[in-house]
């Protein structure tokens, strides 16, 4: 499996980025399959090499075919091909409604009327239902159907530099459209389409949530309990999640292999004295696997939990047949099975971190443990717990730095406390559910669990507030992260095997890494940009010069909150810039900005530029939804481009766009087209 997996991954990546047509993939499969078959009958070493190469190319072609077949847009009945704006849509909710600030949200499958016939289409949509004045949840649940004619909106990115690619994320899950519906814009049908097994999972999830909310005092504590046991994150406090992330223990509230391992350990303990007969082993295997897979499906079947479920399945089946399994082969086998089912899981951060963490532990935990021999049994176990945490960081660091741009300095301290405590909490939650039919006992256990969670939260938040707890603002490109990972692996091989070749490889990779970083730093020092951000209902402009930026916009965006962290921080990390109040080579007037030889006019609200500013400009930025007519201003300013920021209404933007078209001027609306970046 270790030989097959890299080729499959290569095929998945190549097909996604190069988009070969189906015919090419099928031809490649036939050619390489025939070549492998032909060379397999030859006995010479040369032909054996050709057989191996042909086989790898065959697996690469298979990886590409997996991507093509799983890409919804290639299906003949894809929603992107069958849907038209005027179509009547019948949406079937695929999950219970989730409450948001101003709406209720759910994923839904879709049927559309094509030529007066109701037709199923491939792909799902996200439905947002507006809250009424009382905030009551609509009488809809899993399987309910609604019908509406409001046009679906394409899911798009905010388009800010360095931002999360939400559009691609949704596409990987077969989601391409969304719709926001008021109560008067849809009707509920009497039809209900459910799958009994899914209904059972949602019923169990609902029972667990109600039990925790009833038995565990405290909203924040109940939210952590829900996330820790079944991966339900909608009730988590946002600031608390950030604290867990900053201290390196976010895996505790993000369902992972650790949770499944704890449940597996509990089941093994319960069956410890069940006997070793063949019948007993098979009964044990069926019960353990049913529990593990039921728990995995209940928590949403994320890649990290599926990795653990598949690996434990191999382990349990091997024990049943009294055979030991290879951890590396198990890892490769589980990854291959997941990718065969969903090749887009390769881009899932949980998938990447789960496999690199387990691989890192498998490779490095024992060598690190052996660095220090401890006679005392309990001290030795404490050291082993730390070595597992240390080992997991070795291969995951480049991935964490690439995706999250930070590194928790105190991860050892927080994991020493949080991991064992979270294990006790998990077992306490299971016991709470088991005795939930005894109210007095369940309330007592809920009270104890509540204070355990409170203690864990308090400790994590206290550590998170320490000034040295986190290195923030790290930015790696994909090549840099890949080279750093190869450097770590080569260095590790050299240290463990004393291989001169590994030392040379590590030195070369390290030199290449620093070369790439140096090139990036040089580029950063030379950058000069004006960035008009897409922040809904807010004005935000960064003037970038080298490693610094000056901000112009709404004061609320200066606060360290969600708006800044989600919309602006990724760009500043991407550009590796720090804020200053003033910058050289920059002149600010009431409505004008002079950037070197570039002049920008900002039209805010109803304030017209002064006579001194009514001269030719390179760029006009419209902000604050002004009521002024542009015709006269455009003739005086003669800008090369007009940019409307996210504070303007769609109606005004459409009017201005028409005026710009009549004058043959480029027009950019950040709300629909993403941030605008001007090099100066």
Image (tube, helix red, strand yellow):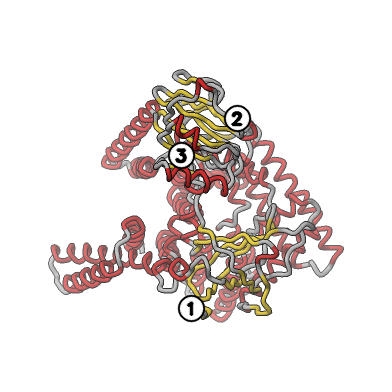
240 and 81: which one is in front?
81
Q: Nearer the viewer, residue 4 or 616?
A: 616
Which numbered disc, 2 or 1, marks the residue that appears first in the sequence? 1
At 51% from the left and 65% from the top, the residue drawn is 85
Q: Which image quarter is the N terminus in?
A: bottom left
Residue 286 seen in render: yes
Q: Which image quadrant is residue 461 in?
A: top right
The secondary structure type at the circle numbered 1 is loop
Question: What residue is pinned by disc 1?
Answer: 115
> Disc 3 to disc 1, how far (Cα)?
41 Å
Question: Closer to the observer: label 2 or label 3?
Answer: 2
Q: CA distance from mark 2 to mark 3?
A: 23 Å
Instruction: Residue 424 in the image: state x and y as whole percent.
Output: 69, 54
Residue at 49 percent across and 25 percent down: it is: 614
Q: Secondary structure at mark 2?
A: loop
Foreground label between 2 and 1? 2
| Residue that label 2 marks | 607
Q: Is residue 406 visible?
A: no
State the CA–CA distance, disc 2 to disc 1.
Answer: 52 Å
């Amino acid at each position: 499996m270790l030989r097959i997996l890299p080729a499959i991954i290569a095929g998945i990546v190549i097909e996604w980025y190069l988009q070969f047509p189906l015919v090419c993939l099928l031809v490649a499969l036939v050619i390489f399959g025939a070549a492998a078959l032909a060379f397999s009958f030859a006995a010479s070493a040369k032909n054996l090499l050709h057989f191996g190469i042909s086989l790898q190319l065959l697996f690469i072609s298979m990886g590409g075919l997996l991507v093509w077949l799983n890409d919804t847009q290639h299906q003949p009945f894809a929603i992107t091909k069958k849907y038209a704006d005027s179509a009547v849509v019948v949406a079937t909710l695929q999950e219970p409604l989730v409450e948001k600030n101003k709406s209720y949200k759910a994923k839904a499958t879709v049927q559309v009327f094509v030529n007066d016939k109701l037709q199923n289409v491939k792909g799902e949509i996200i439905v947002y239902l507006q809250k009424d004045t009382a905030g009551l949840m609509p009488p809809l649940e899993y399987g309910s159907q609604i019908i509406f004619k409001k046009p679906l909106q394409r899911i798009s990115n905010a388009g800010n530099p360095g931002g999360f690619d939400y559009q691609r994320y949704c596409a990987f899950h077969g989601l391409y459209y969304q719709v926001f519906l008021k109560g008067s814009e849809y009707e509920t049908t009497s039809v209900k389409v459910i799958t009994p097994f899914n209904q059972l999972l949602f019923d169990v999830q609902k029972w667990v949530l109600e039990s925790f909310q009833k038995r565990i005092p405290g909203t924040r504590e109940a939210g952590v309990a829900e996330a820790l046991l079944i991966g339900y994150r909608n009730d988590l406090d946002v600031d608390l999640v950030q604290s867990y992330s900053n201290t390196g223990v976010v895996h505790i509230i993000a369902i992972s292999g650790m949770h499944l391992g704890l449940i597996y350990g509990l089941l093994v303990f319960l069956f410890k004295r069940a006997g070793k007969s063949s019948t007993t082993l098979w009964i044990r295997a069926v019960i353990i696997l049913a529990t593990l897979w039921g728990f995995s499906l209940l928590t949403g079947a994320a890649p990290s939990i599926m990795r653990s479920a598949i690996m434990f399945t191999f382990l349990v089946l091997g024990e049943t047949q009294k055979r030991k399994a290879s951890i590396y082969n198990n890892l490769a086998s589980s990854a291959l099975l997941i990718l065969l089912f969903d090749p887009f899981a390769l881009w899932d951060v949980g998938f990447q971190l789960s496999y690199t963490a387990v691989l890192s532990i498998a490779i490095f935990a024992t060598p690190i443990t052996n660095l220090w021999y401890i006679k005392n049994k309990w001290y030795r176990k404490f050291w082993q717990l730390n070595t597992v945490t240390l080992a997991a960081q070795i291969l995951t660091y480049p991935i964490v730095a690439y995706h999250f741009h930070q590194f928790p300095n105190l991860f050892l301290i927080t994991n020493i406390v949080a991991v064992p405590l979270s294990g006790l909490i998990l077992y306490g939650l299971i016991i709470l559910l088991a005795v939930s039919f005894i109210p007095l006992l369940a309330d007592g256990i809920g009270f104890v669990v509540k204070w355990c969670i409170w203690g864990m939260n308090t400790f994590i938040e206290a550590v998170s507030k320490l000034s040295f707890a986190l290195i923030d603002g790290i930015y790696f490109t994909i090549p840099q992260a890949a080279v750093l990972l190869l450097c770590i692996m080569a260095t590790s091989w050299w240290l463990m095997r004393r291989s001169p070749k590994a030392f040379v490889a590590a030195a070369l990779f390290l030199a290449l890494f620093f070369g790439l970083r140096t090139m990036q730093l040089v580029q950063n020092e030379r950058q000069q940009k004006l960035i008009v951000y897409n922040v809904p209902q807010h004005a935000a402009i960064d003037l970038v010069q080298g490693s610094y930026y000056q901000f112009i916009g709404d004061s609320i965006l200066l606060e360290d909150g969600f708006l800044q962290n989600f919309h602006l921080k990724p760009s500043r990390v991407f550009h590796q810039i720090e804020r200053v109040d003033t910058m050289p080579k920059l002149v600010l007037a009431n409505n004008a900005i002079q950037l070197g030889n570039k002049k920008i006019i900002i039209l805010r609200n109803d304030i017209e530029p002064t006579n001194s500013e009514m001269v030719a400009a390179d760029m006009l930025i419209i902000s604050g939804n002004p009521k002024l007519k542009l015709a006269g201003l455009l003739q005086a300013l003669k800008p090369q481009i007009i940019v409307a920021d996210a504070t303007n209404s769609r109606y005004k933007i459409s009017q201005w766009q028409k005026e710009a078209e009549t004058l043959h001027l480029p027009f950019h609306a950040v709300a629909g087209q993403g941030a605008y970046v001007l090099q100066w």
